[in-house]
């Protein structure tokens, strides 16, 4: 089943060369409210994280999905043009990792999923609260396979509107909802 037309339309009105992240906030909010409806007890929250001391001034803007005041999923939204920039991808990856560590003490599920969105290109992360394992693993800067590219573009390999992207998103949402039921959140 493809995405409902109102979700596709929300993303299609954004021009390909969008230069402001906020243009994607409405469409992603709409998508998350479709996936995690308020009628099922989910709450969507905009999450603006200030940079840590010593970091450049680049606020992390994410949408946090909560159930019973606990995080069950989140997505960080960046511009599609960041896909072409090695440093922007590295920054997005680093910010995602910090989001997980900032949320770690509030996680009540065995796994917390997060997504990094560069426009509609997605990369998924998982944090296993039982052993505090975050994956995918961090790629060291001196990795022989990638040189200094710690966040290769191909890691954002799923497009939200591809069949594979739809299937993966729905798989994750169903896993999250199953965990929520199992753990009585």
Image: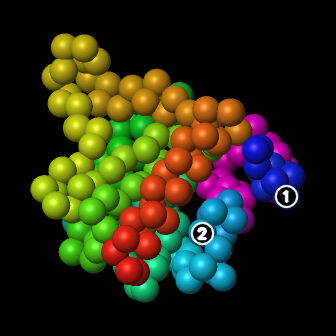
Q: Position of residue 168 (x, y in %)?
A: 54, 41
Residue at the (86%, 52%) spot, across then down: 5
Q: Position of residue 12 (x, y in %)?
A: 82, 46
Residue at the (18%, 30%) spot, across then down: 140
Residue 135, relative to residue 182: is it above or below?
Answer: above
Q: Quadrant of residue 159?
A: top right
Could you tell me if residue 56 is visible in this image? no
Q: Which label number is shown at residue 98? A: none
Dot 1 lies on which element? helix
Judging depth in this view, the residue of 137 and 38 nearest the camera is: 38
Judging depth in this view, the residue of 30 and 25 nearest the camera is: 30
How far is the residue under mark 2 from the one under mark 1?
16 Å
In the image, 130: left or right of 77?
left
| Colour scheme employed for the rendering of this structure | rainbow
Q: In what quadrant of the picture does the N terminus appear?
A: top right
Residue at the (39%, 65%) spot, across then down: 179
Q: Which residues are magenta?
A: 10-30
The residue that disc 1 covers is: 6
Q: In what quadrant of the picture does the C terminus appear?
A: bottom left
In the image, 1: left or right of 149?
right
Q: Position of residue 157 (x, y in %)?
A: 52, 29
The residue that disc 2 covers is: 36
Judging depth in this view, the residue of 177 and 125 nearest the camera is: 177
Q: Quadrant of residue 56?
A: bottom left
């Amino acid at each position: 089943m493809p995405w409902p037309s109102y979700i596709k339309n929300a993303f299609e009105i954004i021009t390909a060369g969008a230069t402001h992240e906020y243009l994607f906030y409405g469409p992603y909010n709409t998508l998350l409210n479709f996936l995690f409806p308020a009628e099922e007890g989910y709450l969507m929250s905009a999450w603006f994280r200030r940079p840590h001391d010593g970091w450049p001034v680049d606020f992390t803007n994410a949408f946090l999905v909560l159930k019973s005041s606990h995080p069950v999923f989140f997505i960080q939204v960046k511009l599609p043009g960041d896909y072409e920039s090695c440093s922007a991808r590295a920054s997005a990856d680093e910010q995602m990792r910090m989001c997980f560590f900032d949320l770690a003490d509030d996680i009540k599920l065995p796994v917390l999923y997060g997504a990094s969105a560069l426009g509609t290109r997605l990369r998924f992360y998982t944090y296993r609260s039982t052993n505090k394992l975050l994956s995918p693993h961090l790629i060291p800067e001196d990795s022989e396979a990638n040189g200094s590219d710690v966040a290769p573009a191909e890691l954002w390999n799923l497009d939200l509107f591809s069949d594979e992207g739809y299937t993966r998103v729905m798989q994750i949402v169903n896993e999250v909802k199953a965990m929520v039921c199992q753990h009585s959140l």
